[in-house]
Image (spheres, coloured by chain):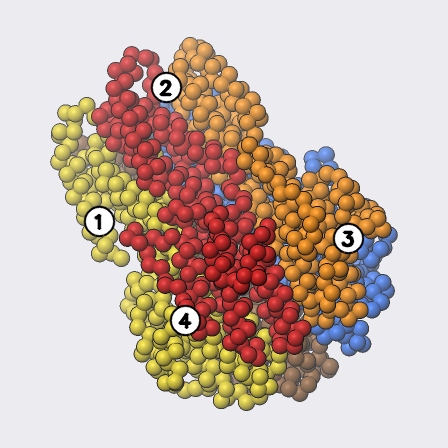
Chain colours: A blue, B brown, C yellow, D red, E orange
Amino acid sequence: MLPKILFRLSLNFVFACIAVVCYLWHEMLDVNLTLAPFSLLGVAIAIFLGFRNNASYARFTEARLLWGNLLITERSLLREVKSLMPDPAEQARYFTSLLIAFTYCLKHQLRKTDMRIDVDRLLAPSERNSVLNSHSPCNTLLLKMGMWLGEQRRLGRISDISFHSIDSNLNHLSSILGGCERISNTPIPFAYSLIVHRTVYLFCALLPFALVSDLHYLTPLVSVFISYTFISLDSLAEELEDPFGMAPNDLPLNAISATIEINLREMIEDDEKPIPMKPDHHCLLS
Amino acid sequence: MLPKILFRLSLNFVFACIAVVCYLWHEMLDVNLTLAPFSLLGVAIAIFLGFRNNASYARFTEARLLWGNLLITERSLLREVKSLMPDPAEQARYFTSLLIAFTYCLKHQLRKTDMRIDVDRLLAPSERNSVLNSHSPCNTLLLKMGMWLGEQRRLGRISDISFHSIDSNLNHLSSILGGCERISNTPIPFAYSLIVHRTVYLFCALLPFALVSDLHYLTPLVSVFISYTFISLDSLAEELEDPFGMAPNDLPLNAISATIEINLREMIEDDEKPIPMKPDHHCLLS
Amino acid sequence: MLPKILFRLSLNFVFACIAVVCYLWHEMLDVNLTLAPFSLLGVAIAIFLGFRNNASYARFTEARLLWGNLLITERSLLREVKSLMPDPAEQARYFTSLLIAFTYCLKHQLRKTDMRIDVDRLLAPSERNSVLNSHSPCNTLLLKMGMWLGEQRRLGRISDISFHSIDSNLNHLSSILGGCERISNTPIPFAYSLIVHRTVYLFCALLPFALVSDLHYLTPLVSVFISYTFISLDSLAEELEDPFGMAPNDLPLNAISATIEINLREMIEDDEKPIPMKPDHHCLLS
Amino acid sequence: MLPKILFRLSLNFVFACIAVVCYLWHEMLDVNLTLAPFSLLGVAIAIFLGFRNNASYARFTEARLLWGNLLITERSLLREVKSLMPDPAEQARYFTSLLIAFTYCLKHQLRKTDMRIDVDRLLAPSERNSVLNSHSPCNTLLLKMGMWLGEQRRLGRISDISFHSIDSNLNHLSSILGGCERISNTPIPFAYSLIVHRTVYLFCALLPFALVSDLHYLTPLVSVFISYTFISLDSLAEELEDPFGMAPNDLPLNAISATIEINLREMIEDDEKPIPMKPDHHCLLS
Amino acid sequence: MLPKILFRLSLNFVFACIAVVCYLWHEMLDVNLTLAPFSLLGVAIAIFLGFRNNASYARFTEARLLWGNLLITERSLLREVKSLMPDPAEQARYFTSLLIAFTYCLKHQLRKTDMRIDVDRLLAPSERNSVLNSHSPCNTLLLKMGMWLGEQRRLGRISDISFHSIDSNLNHLSSILGGCERISNTPIPFAYSLIVHRTVYLFCALLPFALVSDLHYLTPLVSVFISYTFISLDSLAEELEDPFGMAPNDLPLNAISATIEINLREMIEDDEKPIPMKPDHHCLLS
């Protein structure tokens, strides 16, 4: 986040220096740009910025909740399959691969990255194409799970009630998928970001001219400090608005996906687990 | 949104110019319209505007959530029908057409547009009239789904438990319908909008007269800037209050309906899919 | 809402005039009632008023949600009864009359109006008394629905599973009833309203005396404007606090009840529908 | 609430008088305690106080919701038992006494009052001891309901599905119990109350010294008014924090318990109903 | 909490003293560091701090809710097992030990303490290893419960419907586990804490230099008071952010775990209950 902000703050610094230099001309005009209107505006902007931060953070929190629920639901699904199937070991393996593929496909879909490698790694060749060519690969995987479950029921391996108990967890997966798509496809109304953005920048650009009559040589210091508070919160709100991105404060989807895979593989006693991801030296996961 | 705001801001600009011109007379009166009471009022208005923005944005968010749930629930319904029916291909086709018709009818009902074209396209001639003449077409479609499902159960094609599992998703559709009707029929209490609206405009109209004694020739600049912050947020709140409208920041119901249709048709391997909608050059969908 | 506010604002106008007149004596005292303490207090009051508005609006929203859910749940109940019963036409008619009676009784209970007319219109003579004499008529109606449903199950007309599926929607009705009773019986803690109320009025009464030293003859104008903002929001919060009342900004329970009756009667193809209510010339429904 | 506040406000009045008297010495010092830093602090404190009020009010609201759900769930439970049991009159009577005992025990547990009288009144002698000696009497009553229900199922009086339908409402009772225990056992983090409390009092104590240079003889009036706003909201937040207490603004658990008992007894046509409680002359219920 | 804050406040006190001492040099410079820009900044920081406090407190509240639900769900699970099993006494004992082990393992996992002692105390030797060596011991315990339940169903001790009723409570346990892991693994975006933290400290460090021109010798007093308000709320937000920690204001997981164990053991009439924990002399539980 810093480089983007640094640039804006240096701009603000330059403005403040100009304000100090221009102060001589200032005094000749009969104009007295006091802090009072900026104080009023500053508080109003802080309130609106607080509102926008709330909205962005709520998106971040909901996105995290959905991925938390993904882990929960997949573990529950596999637990149910294992405790209900007459011969769980073999059947659970195929179902687990669908669950893991669902996780990775969702990740790739949200980040708009290529899902081919993970699909190849997890699915049988006969199933890859229908997933990769689909308009919504995750939904196709869900349909596959449903068809497999219907097949098991038709073969008498699970009872009617068991079918619906597991199926209701598939509905949860469907909700998670739809929730992620909703967050990803519907940004905060563009006008909000624009209005808050514009007013924050204009406010910070004009601020030094209002501060200079009181602060003289201290103007750059105080101006950059106030601007830092406003601009950094504006930038962060922008970053959190798309929680599925790959910026440092976004969700660590790679790490969560790996955790899900490790958990599921452990449940079917599969030793080919991926290595858990460690945070980097900034304590961040990708 | 801009034209509406532009007009209001130019009005404010004119007021500010009048304030500058009148300043000579000002000084002769023993009146000193300082910024202090406006500062107090400005912060209070910002707080109330923040509250109204919250309420409007909550409506927008809930409306989006309901349409997200529509996609989720219809996909789940179709998945369940496909995995439970003995001969899914044929039966799912009729049910799918009801689901898609429900989507488009809901869109037309909320936007108060004519639903005839979509109903003609999706339903058999024998069914069109009962839908079009109904007081609540979407509810009639839901009843049709329920009756069809009851018929399948009576014919022994689905078990009792399967019936109720699918039926509980019909209840979800019913909730979505009722939720959309609620948002559409119950605006934010009229008095709120009115009070906030009025105070914002009066505040912006009086502001230049309070600024002029300090700022002189800079009054129009600062006055328009402060007014922009308040008026644009007020306008946006007004726009988001009715999220089903057709203004640029409203929900892209056309695009969401098309996505739902594409998803459902793909699930029954129907190739007559509509073309997904692309955002226009303002990144907006209709 | 206006008359109540108008009176309070004229009072404020009178105070402001007194302040202007008294200003001569003011100056003789060594007292300087500046705006600064009022500014501090005004912002604090705005924050607390914002909080109270939030609480009142949340009650209004929840009440609207409950009545929205009433429509949703009654439509779902009737759809289920129609799709499950072997001979729906006749049996649904009795059940529908109970549902509609429940709606009107709930409305009358919340508004403390006489429910006799609607009960007479909707229920058979043999059933009227037990409802009208009950401590909680709505709960008695719910119990009747439950007993009727239990009867159908005992007669073998619906299966065990169908019974519980419909019964869970009766539980929803029970939640809606309880939710409405809760909102209606538990106001926002009285002390809140009192504290905010008192401080708003005292603040508005003292305000002109603080404004007069700067504004002189403009005092009444600015004072009434600021008071309008605070007093109107306080009055609105008071009105929304009891969303089931009959003030203009309260919920249009008459219109919603009529809509529910129309919807349910249409579902059983009953032509005795009431006429939908039209908004009056203030765009308000009763 | 008033006595506690009155004492604090008179203290504030005394401070203000001291400030007026000391003003002569004030002026000799080269110190100028203006309102500006207090204005900044006052707004900050108002924001934090608003936050604490929100948290307290949320606890109050949740507690009320839980008791509303208690009424809802117990009515639903009894309705289900009555519509499912072959010979409801007799069996429902025992179950009803457990439900009513659960209500009163929960009330006594939350208010830390003696539950012996109500237990004696409602339960058979053989059952009293196990309830009264239990670490958690309400949970013991829930277990008794579960065991009774399991007994009915074993005797073939209710089917498997009916058992689980009723049992899921017992799970709701369990949630309500756990929710009340949570609110009662986990106060708002102590540090919050402490920080806000301390700053509010220190702020009010220092305020007169900042007001006196402008207001002279009016200092006590304005100081007490501002202090009233802050102190009364702080006190109310403190009161609402423990919604199960017996202060005037706490929840009227006695009245709600009586309402539940009346409702349940009416459902089983039992005439031994308690008398509904009437609000006292302050419109408050205990 | 105090030592950490005390250090920061003494630093602030030192800064304030420096400001008083330096004031002579101040006056020689043509710089006038007034409070106005700090007032603007202070309100903005208070708004952002309020936002961060909200976010931290929401995490604390959710964490408490999850542990409350843990108690509720485990009591419900045991009640169901006891009322459904033909020979509850023996079978419930093993299931109870798994439930209690789940509680303690969750506590140790969240606090990153050693779970060996509690696992040894609660589980049979044959089961300890698979739990202790697992990547997610709690999930392994859940799987064990599911497998045991499946076993009971296969042996015909519980019916299909009973299985799914209990299994849906296992899904709740799974949600609680996933929710706790989510809170524990996903802090509030680091940048938020950082930005608010930095601005609070810089603000408090610069504050005395702005106060000194008005307050002279009173600067340290007022500066430390204002700093106390901001710094203590910042510190508390930091503490609540990780509600599973062992700081005084964190959740008393030891006490809650003991309560759960006591409740469950009482339900199976096991006398080996642990002693309930008493709050220490600061009214805090660990």
Distance, label 1 to label 3, CA atoms, is 67 Å
Q: Residue at x 49, y 53 (%)?
A: D115
Where is D26 relative to C230, above or below? above
Distance, label 1 to label 2, CA atoms, is 40 Å
Query: Helix, strand, or loop for circle 4?
Result: loop
D18 and E228: which one is in front? D18
Where is E65 relative to C26, above or below? below
Give the residue at the far front of this rendering.
Answer: D125
A142 and D101: which one is in front? D101
Q: Are marks 2 and 3 in contact (CB under 8 Å)?
A: no
> Which residue was labeled with disc 3?
E140
In the rendered structure, the answer to whether residue B100 lies left or right of residue C59 reads right
Q: Position of residue B143 (x, y in %)?
A: 54, 80
The nearer-to-camera label among 1 and 2 is: 1
> Which residue was labeled with disc 2?
E214
> Which residue was labeled with disc 1?
C8
* Residue A66, disc: none
| Mark 3 residue crowding within 10 angstroms, few (<14) / some (14–19) / many (20+) | many
The quadrant in which the C terminus of chain A is found is top right
Distance, label 1 to label 4, CA atoms, is 51 Å
> Which residue was labeled with disc 4?
D271
Query: Helix, strand, or loop for circle 1?
Result: helix
The nearer-to-camera label among 2 and 3 is: 3
Q: Position of residue A264 (x, y in %)?
A: 78, 55
